[in-house]
Amino acid sequence: MFSSNGKLHVLPHGLSERLHLPEDVEVIDPRFRRYWHSYLVQAFLATVTMLTILIFVDSLADAALAAGLGSSIVILFVHPSASAAKARSVIGGHTLALLVGMACSLLLFDSSMGEIFAQNRFFSDSALAISVGLVILIMAVTNTEHPPAAATVLGMAIQPIDPLRTAVFISAIILLALIHYLFKFRLQDLI
């Protein structure tokens, strides 16, 4: 099944040739054997970081926010040199998403049009989709692209604004950037 080089045998040789597909699929990153300690340390740091965040962001209503932060952790600890892992992108992307999400939340929950949105799911879904498109546009224009911010904009937009949740989320964003800054000299790209 597995060969000594970490590949998984998936197709018979003849079928592989006829379909012009590889006979073996690389399942285990070849760099893992050489840098296994970095993989383990970075996975541990990611676990501790996520636990710290989940202690503060713990309600089911905040699941989208936690998912966005979890996705950020993946970027920071798997591909720390990526442009999406830079402090400008992490802080900027999530902050812009927070602001756009709050604006959408005000529209959906605190405006005179809130009842129209509540009665027609298409309108509320459209507002949420527009909020994602808008935050993508703003991140691209401001060079703060951070894909996990899409979860942040949705997490903020689908519920009424809560100052405590907002403050905790901003703190979590800053914590992410700080942890990345403190450990960046020890982190290496795992992909």
Image: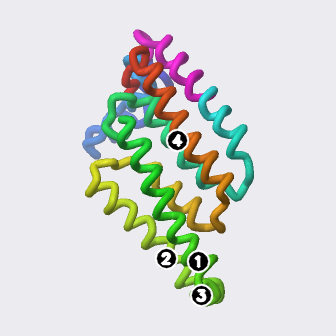
Tell me the amino acid under the disc marked 4.
Ile
In three-dimensional space, the C-alpha distance between marks 2 and 3, rounded to whole angstroms, equals: 15 Å
Residue 57 at x, y = what percent?
68, 45
Q: Is residue 145 above or below residue 25?
A: below
Task: Determine the secondary structure under disc 4.
Answer: helix
**Callout 3: 10 Å neighbours few (<14), some, many (20+)?**
few
For the record, the magenta segment spans: 32-47
Residue holding disc 3: 112
Task: Determine the secondary structure under disc 2.
Answer: helix
- N-term-proximal mark, 1 vs 2: 1
Residue holding disc 4: 173
Tell me the amino acid under the disc marked 1.
Leu
Task: Determine the secondary structure under disc 3.
Answer: loop
Marker disc for residue 108: 1
In three-dimensional space, the C-alpha distance between marks 2 and 4, rounded to whole angstroms, equals: 25 Å
Task: Determine the secondary structure under disc 1.
Answer: helix
- N-term-proximal mark, 4 vs 3: 3
Residue drawn where x is 62% and y is 78% of the image? 110
